[in-house]
Amino acid sequence: MSARNKAVSAYEAHVQEGVLLNANESPTNFDEQILTEIKASLDTTLFHRYPDDSYRSLKEAYAQVVGVEPDMVLCGNGSDQMLGLLIGCAMAEGKTLATLAPDFGMYDYYVSMYGGTIKKYPIAAGKPLDMDAFVAFAKDADMVLFSNPNNPTGNLVSGADIEKLLQTIRHVPVVIDEAYMEFADESVVGLLDQYPNLFVTRTLSKAYGAAGIRLGFLLSRAENIQKLGALNVPYNVSRTTQTIGEILLRHAATFAGRVEQICRQRERFAELAPSLRRFTLYPSHANFVLVEGEGLDDLLAAFKARNIVVREYAGKPYCRITIGSVAENDQVLEIIRKVDESDA
Ligand code: PMP
């Protein structure tokens, strides 16, 4: 498989038809008011000019939303690009990155691209991470990185446990990928001042439903951001994306409301879980759920028959389903219930 194909399969976001519950996107576009503001903001007079490469006002807007200083923010073409930058700085032949299994597939892609080795500590959906064991596992690595909440299990590691990790691992970067943090509300951004080796990546792709504009952030202490900024690709965030990003951040409260709606929909999955016989539907702290069971092939066939696209994992007995609109969730829950009731 080429590196490019590997990267695409890590996302599986290239499918464009059907009920798309495979890439943890928002089920709906921005509302009319935001769309009107975006259209009005489009400056058609400056397409021939490079954008502002300091990203000053975008950094200020994001810093205000998350409660840090603007010089603690780096802007990326998706948080994915920020992860690539961090991994690229720490990995080379002979260097090792410690992560979890399963976790976000792009970590493998970047580590192998830079010639490093990835080692993975196995976790189980619905079970807490044994942080002492993970610290022992990770302590000789050159970088520690995992997503929290975890993609694809939906597990959440507490801030207190991450602090335990940071108290032991002090000399190599510890990166917490908080792509889904808003759905769990348990961030380690508050620890940045205390731990100079802590890096946090965030995105507007999930809670802000803005996967199409490609805007992510890296947060760390100002001296780290200054160093990484010098290594970052110039003009990596377009003028249009910067403008739209600032508009979306002005509407942070609207998006917080949408996150609440998704979390309420997630409750419907949690309510169904105990009644299932053939499947385990794991509790989740993100905008997706993981379903596992012997009858997975039947379930996948039933989704396909209704043109519902979910995230499959080759050779694994589970699939990941993005929490969609009310109507989409109605369909998904009914299919899970029916397949569960049918005889194997
Ligand atoms: N981290 C995790 C855990 C993800 O699941 C994703 C996207 N699916 C990303 C990072 C990258 O998101 P983006 O580049 O859209 O910000």
Image (cartoon, rainbow, N blue to C red):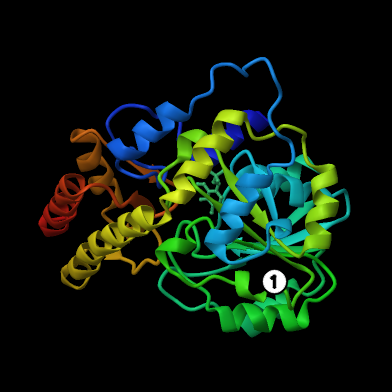
Q: Position of residue 76 (x, y in %)?
A: 65, 43
User: Circle 1 sits in a helix, a strand or a loop, which is it?
Assistant: loop
Whether residue 307 is visible here, answered yes or no, is yes
Residue 203: give x, y in percent of width and height: 54, 50
Q: Quadrant of the N terminus?
A: top right
* Residue 212 position within the rendered picture, expressed as x and y whole percent measured from the top left: 47, 34
Classify 49 as above or below 310: above
Foreground residue, 253 or 158? 253
Residue drawn at x 59%, y 42% is: 78
Please tell me which residue lies in front, 217 or 53: 53
| Left or right, residue 80 beside residue 263 | right
Q: Nearer the viewer, residue 213 or 135?
A: 213
Please determine whether, in this image, residue 14 is positioned above or below residue 266.
Answer: above
Q: Is residue 326 left or right of residue 44?
A: left
Image location of residue 337, percent across then percent down: 14, 57
Mark 1 neighbour density, 10 Å: few (under 14) some (14–19) many (20 or more): some
Quadrant in the rendering for residue 49: top right
Q: Is residue 300 above or below residue 305?
A: below
- The residue that appears at 60% across and 64% down in the rendered structure is 100
Disc 1: which residue: 192
Horizontally, is 137 left or right of 9 in the view?
A: right
- Tell me the amino acid under the disc marked 1: Leu
- Is residue 33 placed above or below 59 in the rendered structure? above
